[in-house]
Image (cartoon, grey):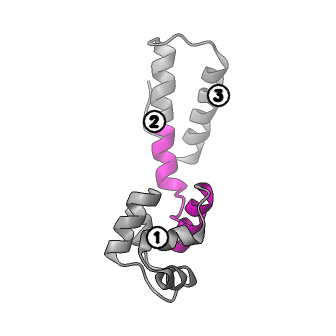
Amino acid sequence: MLKPIKNSQQYEDALAKVYILMQKDIKQDSQESDELEILSILIKEYENIHFQVPKPNPIEAIRFRLDQMNMSESELSDILGYRSRKSEILSGSRKLNLSMIRKLTEKLRIPAEVLIQAY
């Protein structure tokens, strides 16, 4: 019977069981496939609580996303509306406002929760 993962030993045991199940040729909608899916959900929940990944700095997220999308910083000026704003934002001398966050979320698909953080 599957139970919630409450400690590191149970977590390690669940990982080992998932590894074993993934080595098999499991048929869809079988008891083993259901077990694998449920264990994966339990492991993910445990990791979300105990191994949280911090959200990136908003400026780092913007730079990273520009790089991912092969966009230049001048294209960021087009999104924000002013060339000077781009420089001020990337240097950290100006904070993002709500309008900028909306535009960046729409155009660069950066989650608003990343952009609204204090930095």
Q: Give whichever of discs 3 and 2 has the lower sequence position.
A: 3
Q: Amino acid at mark 3?
A: Tyr
Residue at 48% from the left image edge and 41% from the top image edge: 5
Residue in the foreground of this view, choosing between 65 and 45:
65
In the image, 44 versus 102, the foreground residue is 102
Q: Is residue 20 left or right of residue 27?
A: right
Query: What percent of the width, then of the height, locates residue 33?
Result: 50, 18
Residue 11 position within the rendered picture, expressed as x and y whole percent measured from the top left = 56, 41
Which residues lie in the magenta part?
41-68
Circles 1, 2 touching at the beta carbon (< 8 Å): no
The kind of residue tagged 2 is: Ile
Q: CA distance from mark 1 to mark 3?
A: 48 Å
Name the residue furthest right: 23
Residue 110 in sight here: no
Q: Which residue has dot 2 on it?
A: 41
Residue 35 visible in the picture: yes
| The magenta stretch spans residue 109 | no
Residue at (41, 78) in percent of width and height: 96
Q: Nearer the viewer, mark 1 or mark 3?
A: 1
- Secondary structure at numbered mark 2: helix
The numbered mark, 1 or 3, whose residue comes first in the sequence reads 3
Q: Which residue is mark 3?
A: 19
